[in-house]
Amino acid sequence: MFKAIVSASTLRDALDSVSVLVDECKIRLNEDELAIRAVDPANVGMVDLALDAAAFESYEADGGVIGVNLSRLEDIAGMANAGDLVHLELDEETRKLHIRIDGLSYTLALIDPDSIRQEPDIPDLDLPATIVLEGNQLDRGIKAADMVSDHIALRVDEDEEAFFIEAEGDTDDVDLELGRDDLIDLAAGPANSLFSLDYLKDMNKAIPGDAEVTVELGEEFPVKLHYEIAEGMGQVTYMLAPRIQSD
């Protein structure tokens, strides 16, 4: 059983955060939250989304799991204006999702959840550095790095108490330094890892510019990025595996 009403903007923010990594996913319709956890086909990037029942205008669910084609669901949500309410209802017998937006009705065929990739286990990492910054600062560093390279280094200098976003190209280099005064918060620790810029660009597309983004970082460890959506009633966590540098 699943029946919910949610604002189009909240639904889109939630779907966007997942669709940057995967085309289809399982949605867990828990009693107190809607949850999605997925990993991209190359096992490099992972997303964990939880949207609390309180983020919905109304929400009833009994713990089932559905499989959805995300791009199709996003297209439907895209038909709504930001202030519109989206009515969602699962038809248990036909295993289809009925969606209503301001007079428009859409029936979405669901995918067998068993045919979708297994949900990943989120590794429990105790990373030594934590950086809290605005989404648009991260966006600036990623865009700058993209001009010169397809890799990006994230680094913390413990002595300088600063966070660096760096990229080295064949001819040009980019370096964005954010000191403690530029950041919302910084717990400095040994941290320096290299990542694929393509993945970080995709994740960055979903992160609002005004979001407070928490970055957890280590030395040649995955990076964890957390931010909130739906006025704090939704949480998104990304994890991205590092590119191990060979000497």
Image: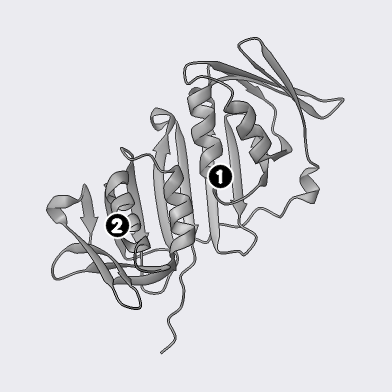
Front position in the image: 222 or 205: 205
126 vs 205, nearest the viewer: 205
Left or right: residue 114 versus residue 57 is: right
The spot of residue 194 in percent (x, y) is: 39, 71
Q: CA distance from mark 1 to mark 2?
A: 22 Å
Q: Residue at x 46, y 70 (%)?
A: 242
Dividing the picture into quarters, in which one does residue 43 lie?
bottom right
Q: Quadrant of the C terminus?
A: bottom left
- Where 8 sits versus 243, above or below? above
Residue density around tag 1, few if under 14, some if 14–19, many if 20 or more, within 10 Å: many
Q: Quadrant of residue 120?
A: bottom right
Residue underneath mark 2: 141
Quadrant location of residue 77?
Answer: top right
Could you say where residue 240 lies in the image, as x and y percent from the top left? 48, 61
Q: Residue type at mark 1?
A: Val
Find disc 1 in the rendering and name its residue: 18
- Under tag 1, what secondary structure? helix
Q: Is residue 145 left or right of residue 203?
A: left
Can residue 30 be seen here? The reply is: no
Q: Which amino acid type corresponds to the residue marked 2 in the rendered image?
A: Gly
Q: Residue at x 49, y 59 (%)?
A: 199
Residue drawn 46% across the image and 34% down it:
234
Asked if the residue at tag 2 contacts the one at tag 1, i.e. Cβ–Cβ closer than 8 Å, the answer is no
User: Which numbered disc, 1 or 2, marks the residue closer to the eye?
Assistant: 2
Quick one: label 1 or label 2, which is nearer the N terminus? 1
